[in-house]
């Protein structure tokens, strides 16, 4: 039986979809069977980021309304052999067309087939958010180093903690700009983590390569020279139990020591979710 992880934030535009696509791609490249589920009904962006739009025939609403069986709606990413699949959202349906029972039934079935079911959560904390988080075993909260983003993430963390998920929510800080942190014009990593009080899974720098990769329908992990791609690869390895320190600030000792300390505080940066048996690592 696999596990389901919702990628959420509260605020829109923080990079949930990019995070879902890149982490899923790394896990698939490491031999894990992964299914990404886009629950952003009415918008649907995950397929575009992955370059899979032309392959979509059916979506999650077709499955929920029994027009097709689930296997017909799954889209395989040919770049990862038989390890990476997508269940797309509907571009035209109303978000209220799905209910928690139908989503839970779909996710439960996928967990029997895949090691990871990565759920791309819609923005906000209302109906679509509730459908996504209530069927998940754990959560990755994505935030940016901005007050509004961290404030929304704090609200989401409170909701997730009240749900008593089997897996502790973890944090990714996205779109970090080192020069702004050094200049004191951006929130610092340790301030964000101390505010949200959940384990830090990784930080991702803000760089043009992420946008370029997304526009080309691929993930940035394929670019070996990308700092962001390097960060996503490290995040996925941490999810699988490897102890990898945060090193993107290794040229700035003050920030590096702070970030590494925060990871060490999160169960030594390894076995982040050892309450999940038979997984051998953080999430997997």
Image (spheres, rainbow, N blue to C red):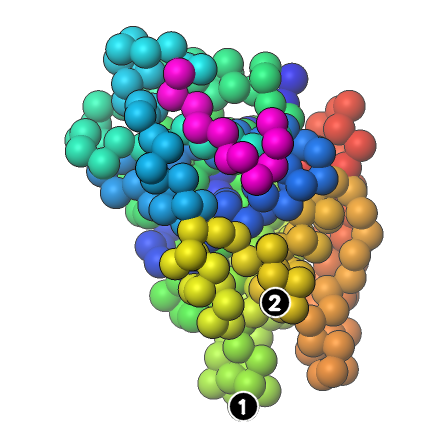
Residue 83: x, y in percent?
A: 61, 30
Which residue lies at the image location 27% right of the left edge and 11% below the top edge? 67
Q: CA distance from mark 1 to mark 2?
A: 23 Å
Where, by quadrant of the figure, is residue 32 drawn?
A: top right
Residue 110 in sight from this viewpoint: yes
Which residue lies at the image location 41% right of the left edge and 45% below the top edge? 51
Residue 40 in sight from this viewpoint: no
Horizontal side, residue 113 vs residue 163: left or right? right
Q: Is residue 79 magenta?
A: yes
Residue 121: x, y in percent?
A: 40, 40
Horizontal side, residue 85 vs residue 90: left or right? right
Residue 159 against residue 96 in the figure, above or below: below
Tag shown at residue 183? 1
Tag shown at residue 216? none
Residue 137 against residue 108 in the figure, above or below: below
Looking at the rendering, the stretch of residues picked out in magenta corresponds to: 72-82
Which residue, given by chain and number where applicable, does mark 2 sit on? 226
Which residue lies at the image location 78% right of the left edge and 42% below the top edge? 241
- Of the numbered discs 1 and 2, the one sitting upstream in the chain is 1
Quadrant where the image shows the N terminus: top right
Viewer-closest of 159 and 55: 55
SS state under label 2? loop
Q: Residues within 10 Å of mark 1 (few under 14, many from 20)?
A: few
Residue 225: x, y in percent?
A: 65, 68
SS state under label 1? helix
Where, by quadrant of the figure, is residue 146 drawn?
A: bottom left
Q: Residues within 10 Å of mark 2 (few under 14, many from 20)?
A: some
Q: Tell us which disc is closer to us: 1 or 2.
A: 2
Q: Is residue 85 magenta?
A: no
């Amino acid at each position: 039986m696999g596990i389901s992880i919702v990628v959420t934030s509260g605020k829109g535009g923080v990079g949930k979809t990019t995070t879902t696509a890149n982490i899923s791609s790394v896990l698939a490249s490491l031999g894990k069977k992964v299914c990404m589920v886009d629950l952003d009904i009415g918008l649907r962006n995950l397929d575009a980021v992955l370059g899979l739009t032309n392959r979509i025939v059916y979506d999650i609403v077709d499955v929920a309304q029994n027009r097709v069986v689930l296997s017909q709606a799954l889209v395989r990413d040919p770049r990862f052999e038989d390890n990476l699949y997508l269940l797309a959202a509907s571009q035209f349906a109303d978000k209220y067309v799905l209910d928690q029972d139908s989503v839970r039934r779909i996710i439960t079935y996928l967990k029997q087939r895949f090691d990871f079911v990565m759920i791309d959560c819609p923005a906000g904390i209302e109906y679509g958010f509730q459908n996504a988080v209530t069927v998940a075993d754990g959560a990755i909260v994505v935030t940016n180093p901005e007050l509004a983003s961290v404030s929304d993430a704090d609200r989401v963390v409170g909701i997730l903690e009240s749900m008593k998920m089997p897996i502790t929510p973890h944090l990714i800080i996205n779109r970090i700009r080192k020069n702004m942190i050094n200049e004191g014009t951006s929130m610092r990593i340790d301030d964000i983590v101390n505010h949200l009080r959940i384990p830090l899974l990784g930080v991702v720098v803000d760089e043009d390569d992420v946008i370029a990769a997304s526009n080309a329908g691929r993930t940035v992990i394929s670019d070996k020279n990308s700092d962001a791609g390097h960060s996503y690869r490290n995040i996925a390895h941490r999810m699988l139990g490897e102890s990898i320190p945060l090193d993107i600030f290794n040229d700035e000792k003050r920030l590096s020591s702070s970030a590494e300390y925060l990871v060490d505080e999160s169960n030594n940066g390894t076995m982040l979710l050892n309450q999940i048996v038979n997984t051998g690592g953080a999430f997997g």
